[in-house]
């Protein structure tokens, strides 16, 4: 079972999402088309072409997505911690729910972008969809890995 009250756990997840979202700027801007998923997501919100999405909106969507994904991870861990064994924990975070949460949320954000956002809102960048989706897969993996490593460290500080 999770060793933290739900409000404290949610706050930890928000902070983790903010920090990991900031860290993700590094692989996203260093990849050739790594930041395009944020423009595609912005296009989905504005119903515009990704080329017409402003940089501030793309950045806001990127960081908002990191926060939402971290909260989704937190909800998965909190829910699973009631039903899965908590024999091992990382600073009060049950290991199995933690690993399932990180893996599940990373897979979900990849799948959602690759199968829903990109095909529907890719617009002018749709011709480069395969490369953009591959780079998004790497970013989703980095997100999950960073979240998996950062959450147990962050809860130790709380």
Image (cartoon, rainbow, N blue to C red):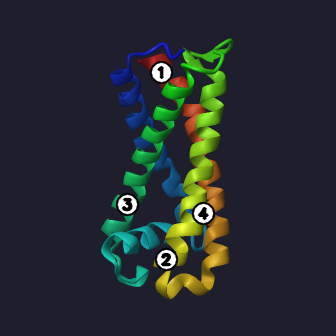
* Label whose residue precedes the other's in the sequence (4 or 2): 2
* Label whose residue precedes the other's in the sequence (3 or 4): 3
Instruction: Find residue 61 and name its label.
Output: 3
**Above or below: residue 3 compared with residue 21:** above
Please give the residue where the numbered disc 4 appears in the rendered image. 136
Distance from the alpha carbon under mark 2 to that under mark 3: 17 Å
- Please name whichever residue, 26 or 96, is drawn nearer the observer in this view of the structure: 96
* Label whose residue precedes the other's in the sequence (1 or 4): 4
- Please name whichever residue, 133 or 31, is drawn nearer the observer in this view of the structure: 133
**Above or below: residue 31 compared with residue 156:** below
* Label whose residue precedes the other's in the sequence (1 or 3): 3
Callout 3 crowding tier (Cα within 10 Å): few <14, some 14–19, many ≥20: many
Distance from the alpha carbon under mark 1 to that under mark 2: 38 Å
- The N terminus lies in quadrant: top right
Which callout, 1 or 2, points to the residue nearer the camera?
2
Callout 1 crowding tier (Cα within 10 Å): few <14, some 14–19, many ≥20: some
Instruction: Find residue 155 and name its label.
Output: 1
Please give the residue where the numbered disc 2 appears in the rendered image. 120
Which callout, 2 or 3, points to the residue nearer the camera?
2
Residue at the image point whose x is 60% and y is 87% from the top = 127
């Amino acid at each position: 079972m999770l060793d933290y009250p739900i409000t404290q756990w949610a706050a930890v997840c928000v902070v983790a999402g903010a920090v990991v979202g900031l860290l993700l700027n590094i692989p996203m801007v260093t990849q050739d088309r790594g930041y395009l998923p944020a423009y595609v997501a912005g296009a989905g919100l504005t119903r515009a072409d990704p080329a017409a999405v402003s940089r501030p909106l793309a950045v806001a969507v990127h960081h908002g997505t990191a926060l939402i994904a971290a909260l989704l991870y937190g909800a998965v861990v909190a829910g699973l911690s009631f039903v899965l064994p908590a024999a091992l924990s990382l600073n009060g975070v049950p290991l199995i729910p933690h690993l399932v949460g990180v893996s599940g949320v990373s897979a979900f954000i990849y799948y959602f972008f690759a199968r829903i956002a990109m095909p529907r809102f890719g617009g002018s960048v749709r011709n480069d969809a395969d490369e953009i989706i591959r780079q998004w897969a790497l970013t989703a993996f980095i997100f999950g890995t960073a979240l998996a490593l950062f959450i147990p460290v962050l809860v130790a500080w709380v």
